[in-house]
Amino acid sequence: MQASYIEAEELDDGSSLSGIKTNTGNCQTDTDAAAEASCDVTVTTVDSQLWLLVSQGDLFITIDSTPVKSRQLLGGALGEAVLRLQFHAENEPVDVTDLQFTSSGSIATSVDRLELYKEGESTFFALATIGGCGSDEVLSTYGPLGGAVRTFCANLETRQLVVPEGADTDVIVRPRMKNDVGGAVQSGGVVSFFIDSTAASNNSTGSGAIRARGDESSNNLNKNDGDTSGEGEVFLGTATATTNTIISGNRHETVLAKIISITNANPDANGTNVPTGVSPVGQFKFSAAAHTNSKNGLNDAVLSGIVFNVTATNVRLNSSGFYLYNKADSTTKQLCRAYYTNSGGQEISGANYSASGSFVVECKGLDAAAINTEIDQGADATFVLEGDVTHAQVSSTASSTLQVSLQNFTTLGQKTFGNDASTDSHIHWIDKDTTSTNFYWIEYPETIVKSTSYQS
């Protein structure tokens, strides 16, 4: 007889049960009998769960999927997010103990500290400061030219950031800026941060931009060794077990005055009939942030140039009849000029100086003009584009539309004011006290601001 791996007997009379059937296979048979034996015992097997035994977990840090825009960081204020990180733990919860953020392109003199927030929370859970680095090993120079950099460190020894096993935790980095009295440098400074992926993680020497320990194992996580296995390591810039890559944030700029909103200020409702004659065809309110940058006087935002996009369908305007004025003083006006769109700066002129279709109107040199374009901190000013509508409905059988808008003013990389190329900025403003810093962009969520849409 074949050996039985299970033996059983009847409880009432002690007789043995015979024959074992495993899963869907045949019964055990007697070696002397060709016929299949009867089965009194049926065994159903199930594969056990496969377990991976590890001594500690792994931590993965990557750029969060939520994009971060370039910011204008106002002196004396808490800036918006300059970096968003996603932390992911595997095999056990991971307690993050140390974070290092290094400046790029400058030594971030105007940044006092970095406040760290978890997604959805309004109170920071930790601060990263220069003094917080203590005796840790940090970068002081970086890049092929050895440019000076500065590192901000956060020590998290009281479990401020524990990443749950198998889950993601998003961390938002926001800079608290110095005001100019407290040491902020003049506007236009570069602020950008990265996380160094090359330094070995070593708690005894304070080396490694991000250090952590297993929350259950209490073992310190090691530096990524570059292979494709997670063996209790910190992985930077990758969501899988592979080599590290640098984690870099966007470029931002410091300002000591800031335009925070541009809105339609035209009292006419959309759908109002196209006006005739000299009329205020576009009106926009510019608002400036309140601030405490009072060294050498409070800084103001001063408009120096604006390019308006105009759409005039079945409408004609006098191309030499555009003026800009501050609504608080309609008696002082600045002449503006009309140009064909993306034409290399070709001005609309010629017979009747008639402007129609899509074109732009450029108003420049405003800071030196008689018109007041200064916007005080915490205040606002409304600017009006005046036009001379010569034909409100060129064809009586077609509908007419007229609308003025602001475009091409939200990109940090735009460094030239003008009307002749799609890469030109349509805004030029000056951060001004006793000195002046020129800017050609505004941090704003809307890329187009439209005034009233006139229709006839």
Image (cartoon, grey):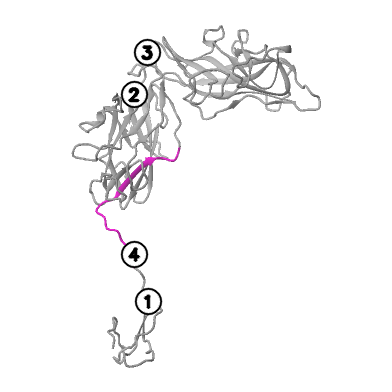
Question: Residue 106's mark?
Answer: 2
Distance between the alpha carbons at the discs numbered 4 and 3 = 68 Å
- For the residue pair 380 and 173, the one nearer the viewer reads as 173
What residue is drawn where x is 31% and y is 30%? 102
Nearer to us of marks 4 and 3 is 4
Q: Main secondary structure of the magenta part?
A: loop
Amino acid type, callout 1: Thr
Residue 240 x %, y % = 36, 47
Q: Secondary structure at mark 4?
A: loop
Position of 290 with respect to 398 (left or right) is left
Of pointers 4 and 1, the one earlier in the residue sequence: 1
Provide residue 332's location: percent of width, then percent of height: 60, 7
Instruction: Name the residue: 37% across, 46% down.
Output: 239
Say which of marks 3 and 1 sits in front.
1
Mark 2, secondary structure of its residue = loop
Q: Give the SS element for disc 3.
A: loop
Residue type highlighted by circle 4: Gln
Please name the residue that numbered disc 3 is placed on. 295
- Where residue 315 appears, x then y in whole percent? 73, 21
Disc 4 target residue: 49
Q: Which badge, 1 or 2, is on the more N-terminal residue? A: 1
Question: Which mark identifies residue 44?
Answer: 1
The magenta segment:
48-66
- The answer to whether mark 4 and mark 1 are in CB contact below 8 A is no
Q: CA distance from mark 4 to mark 1?
A: 16 Å
Residue type pointed to by label 3: Lys
